Image (tube, grey):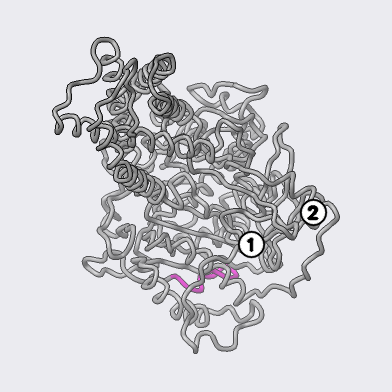
Amino acid sequence: MAMTSNVNSRTESAPVASLARTNRKWAHACVAIALALFAVSVLGGFPGKAFWQDTAEAPSTTAVAPLPPADDEAQQDLPQDSDTLTADDVEAWLDGMFPAALEQGKVAGAVVSVVKDGEVLLSKGYGYADMETEAPMTGDRTLVRPGSTSKLFTWIAVMQQVEQGRIDLDADINTYLDFEIPERFDRPVTMNDLMTHTGGFEEGLKDAIVDQPEDYQALDVFLKEHLRPMIFAPGKVPAYSNYGTAIAGYIVQRVSGEPFDDYVDRHIFTPLNMNRSTFVQPLPADIDAEMSKGYMSSDGPAKPFELISFGPAGSLTSTADDMANFMIALLQYGQFQDSQILQPQTMQRMYTPARPMGEGFTDMAHGFFRATQNGRTILGHGGDTIVFHTDMNIVPEENVGLFVSFNSRGQGDAVYGIRQRLFSSFMDRYFPAPDEAADLPAIATARQHGQEVAGRYETSRRVESGFMSLFYVLIGQSDIILNADDTISMASSPDTKYREVEPYLWREVGGTAMLKMEVVDGVKTIVSSDNPAGVLQPVPPHRNSNLNLFIFAVSVLILIGGVVAWIIAEGARRTYRQPASLTGRPLLIRRLVRIATVLDLAYLGAWFIVIQPILSNNVAFYTAALDPVIRTLQIAMIIPIFGAVVGVWNAVLSIRSGRSWIIKLGSILIAAALLGILWIAHIGGLMSLTLNY
């Protein structure tokens, strides 16, 4: 019999019951299809690399999706040392690699520059800056957006002010601000914390990247109106933060007395002859015409120019030529031709790990990511906007640097694999790794410690307040599993196994990547060798996405099933002209439950409409203009509250009635589903009253 919420009814009409039984399978099929479509639309559309999950910030140390091979001639007789890194060779090698990579990945274009021993070996473009006009990418003229690589200029600006005695890296940053960062924990946030991404801030999205000039906010306005909550004590847990870097840039602005954009232009760009670089947004008229278009993929339309509200963290516009000058200055410890942007000892300090993670682990230096690849130290920083994707790495021992920037995300996020594999191939070609050490045997505690580390984790770079936290309690989590051979794996990459080689230190079988477990501020923490700006932490039971996704899916299934069943039953009643089986209070309760069920589904649908743009990386959708809609939906939290109350009330009355057990079970299931939606709205931040998300 179809589920119903009727109470105090002694009998049901035979035609209604008969028709309901006949159509039960069809009702179940409709429910399954509806739920599948909903799940696919939500889960299948979730981007692998959402705006706040910028995975390319560290120097590239892990090979991923392979690049198409270069032509045979360029691949012959691979050089064995840095003496063979010449302008002709690297150009021939890249010429053989880039065209196929761009075409296969549906990436419109890219620029690349290579420097060695204080000289530019190559600065060149590949593909198109404008697919419609087929304007080519060029190394000297085409402008690109290096994203978070911008942060290196901010940290250099900070250290210039440190040299001048205007900034103390260990002082409370509130000393320099005209607004207050609340001291939630037992010590204040310092500039050192900002430089190492340990300020404790949670991630944010609102107004971060916009495409309409009227939505763009000045740096001070953005920082004051979008103060990010703190979820960690300062200096404890690394959690990559654009907001923290933007604060650092604003401090430079305040202590120097110059707008940040002007400061960088005068004190960094001009000395380095970076004459076509700027942090100004929108672009100055004299260079705007040579800005590359940005694309999701080369077969799609061009996207508007991205306006980055947290400017010091990601608003740089530059060329491959200019970035080559920057790399030369970095390799020469602040010197470029006759200019010295920082003293050598200050540059050395910036290159020194601020929080050493151990041999084989990428460290967070003072703003730089510091890794080891093929036996060489790598310093650098990656960067991603929505459409531009960049990597810049220098190899100090070889006095070599490589910069690359793509103007498209590519089909299936292809650019991430292309970018990462490019630098790995560059290193393997010109600076091959020494003979790899044999895999170490597992130690005796492998199974015991594997059992300790196995579990469900969430990233430290996350949102816990506001409606965007819904992603993190439904699907934004990871599992570590213990394999039968006592190795461990990430559930997302089960074929990659890690063997415990030292207590609580696991090394990739057949590779160099490592994981280790530490206790940080009393919390079990998993550190990856390639990410010093984020860690994994155990998921509390109430945030467990397995539990919450189950509650969400089953609740939606039950509510849709209830609606389908009621429609079928009501249709049958009208077809067979049967009178209503209930009157008075029981009829009122039934109607209230049905209204609550429909309203709950409409409530979820409305939130889905709001959340859907982020699934397609449309970050510019989330501006202050959306506040009235968000506020309306926040007020609408009365809907799941009402639904839960009515559902429980109905279930209690049904249990106390003389109805059949299946009617009582249906009422209980509906009540449980309505409570489930209330729980998801609560834990997912849909009931939060904040407009800062």
Q: Quadrant of residue 291?
A: bottom left
Is 282 located above or below residue 666 in the figure? Answer: below
Residue visible at 53% across and 85% down in the picture: 75
Which residue was labeled with disc 2?
Answer: 446
Mark-to-mark CA distance, 2 and 1: 16 Å
Is 191 located above or below residue 300 in the figure? Answer: above
Q: Taken as a whole, is the magenta stretch helix, strand or loop? A: strand
Q: Nearer the viewer, residue 567 or 321?
A: 567
Specify whether 290 is left or right of 355.
left
Q: Which mark is residue 496?
A: 1
Q: Earlier in the sequence, mark 2 or mark 1?
A: 2
Q: Quadrant of residue 455?
A: top right
Q: Nearer the viewer, residue 382 or 665?
A: 665
- Find the magenta span and give its range: 115-123
Residue visible at 44% across and 39% down in the picture: 260
> Residue 302, percent across and down?
26, 57
Name the amino acid, label 2. Answer: Ala
> Residue 326, percent across and down?
51, 58
